Amino acid sequence: RHKHQTRQTSAESSISSSNTSATSIVDNYRLNMINCHSIAVTIVLLLPLCMSWSSSMKTGTNNNNCDLALAMTARSSRVIGGGGDNDKHENQKQIIVVGGGLAGLSVSLALATLGYRVQIVERRHDWGQRKGGTYLMQPNAIRALEKVCQEAMDPLYDMGVPVPHSDCKMYAWWMVRDSLLQQVLLRKNNISLHMGWSFSNVEDDHPDFIKARFTRTKQTQTQIQEDDDDDGKNTQMIDNDAEDVLDLTGTLLVGADGVHSAVRASLNLAPATHTGSVCWRGSISIIDDNDDNDNDNDNDDDNAIDNNNNIKNAQKLLAPLLTSPLLTTGKMVMGYIKCDQYCVVGLKSFHSKYPGVMTWTVNTREPDAAVKFSHPRDALGAYLDSITKNDNDNDDDDDDDNKKTASLIEAVFELADPEELHHSLPFVTIALPEENQDANVNGTTGWGGTGRVTLIGDAAHAMRSAGGQGGAMAFEDCVVLARILEQTQAQASCGGNANDNDNDTVDEDDVHASNVHHTTRASIETAVQEFESSRLPRVRTIWNDQWERAERAYKGDFTSSRTVADELDYQAWVDKGV
């Protein structure tokens, strides 16, 4: 019935992006002013989802040959891509990226386009199963990803599930990951990918280069991989018992290693802090895959037959919810049910693209929820029990809606993977310096990067997942960092400030091909500070907005605190991107 899947271990995921249209985003919103608040509700309510997409589910995905890409990465636990011999490349032409998630892959593509040799180092030994957070892709994220790598964005336009009354689309996160990964592998002459190495420390005292050390991530000494050949499949042993230390040098180190960033810790920056929210999340299939086996149940015991009937009844109860990605019915408003003062339940349908697939979340703000509750039903117990208790007390429409809502929730629990039901995720954020704070702990005016080390994405500014902007900010980071480094190259090429004379022209090919090595330690340090300080005001504004929206959502208030006009202006500013 279900395949047990690897536990989702990431903290509050950054969810982002949308499919953009040729028309102006501002015009689109102004043409839909009457729907402004419903759009805001859509965005606010898209709290973190999780999809446990497995190969056994009939998802019908378009992977754009990413199965091949993932197979390629699995064949070596050490270096993937064009050679790993660091001595063959001048340090000034090389950048080290820590983390192979969406932020790390994206920034690597942007930097490789500038002519840098990029070394991606990922602590995991493989990419794991295609499961994890669902992404709400917003206009500013799609625009940023187009600038980072149009080829990575092209296959994604038609893969997402449209969100009603907006330009946003819902994606399985690995669709975005696979598309980025494929482009990374195609650029093997500029990008190397090291799997199975954990960041240890960084040394930034040499005038010509920065040095990062990595230690091998612990796991079994050998892996078993399968290779396709003419005769089918054969098992191949891959030796992981190589040297235990990996040293890389370059002109810049980019920490893109998530909310629990090891690079961030090495800079003595404050760690991520808990928001007080806890989430259970997963995916279910409403399509019955066991019809062909109904005749096999003749010899089953009564418990097995009852269990099969319970599954069929749950699927039948939830099937009407497949008609819309964000359904409003009874107590459900645009895919969300406010259960009590602490809990919100979310149900999202991916049926239009992936038949029968639905994602679910249970979010709670109840104090000590992670300690008190081992199952989402425990968090919802008081709410569900109150409906059962009042079952015979009232006979009005509101009571009927409550009973229907309780039945939907119980049906989800019946179909959910037991492992996902018993795995809760405490949400965390990373606070940013206050607006009136002159400098952070490292004496800089950004979010903590110093010298020739900077942070992007969740490692820099993990935020509440209330509007899909966490991932969008990571993509924007990639665009701005690449832009500033390109300006640094141009300044080195011109022997001064490229902006001093608007009539000066620089041949991009010349800059990218031959002038990367002209950048100095001082120019890279200046670029790091310019990057973070220029990004901080926008990121801080959106960070604060996401926090407020999340707090209001838990209170059952899914409207914006702004006026209609102010909300339109704010969304237009956000959507415009960088």
Image (spheres, rainbow, N blue to C red):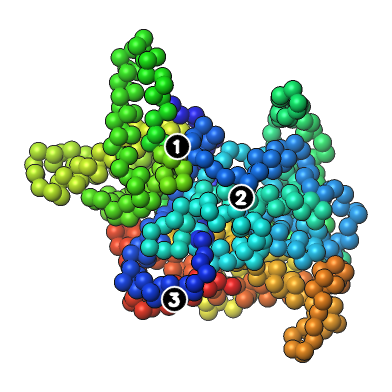
Residue at left offset 75%, top offset 72% = 486
Q: Position of residue 210 (x, y in %)?
A: 81, 61
Residue 206 horizontal side relative to residue 160, left or right: right
What mark, if any, has residue 32 been given in the picture?
none
CA separation in Å, label 1 and label 3: 42 Å
* Residue wearing tag 1: 420
Task: Name the amino acid type tagged 1.
Answer: Glu
Horizontal and vertical percent position of residue 90: 89, 61
Q: Which residue is mark 3?
A: 27
Q: Is residue 290 above or below residue 249?
A: above
Q: Which mark is residue 177?
A: 2
- The amino acid pointed to by label 3 is Asp
> Which quadrant of the figure has residue 501?
bottom right
Q: CA distance from mark 3 to mark 2?
A: 31 Å
Q: Residue furthest top?
A: 299
Horizontal and vertical percent for residue 578?
59, 73
Task: Name which residue lies at 88% across and 57% down.
Answer: 89
Amino acid at circle 2:
Arg
The earlier-in-sequence mark between 1 and 3 is 3
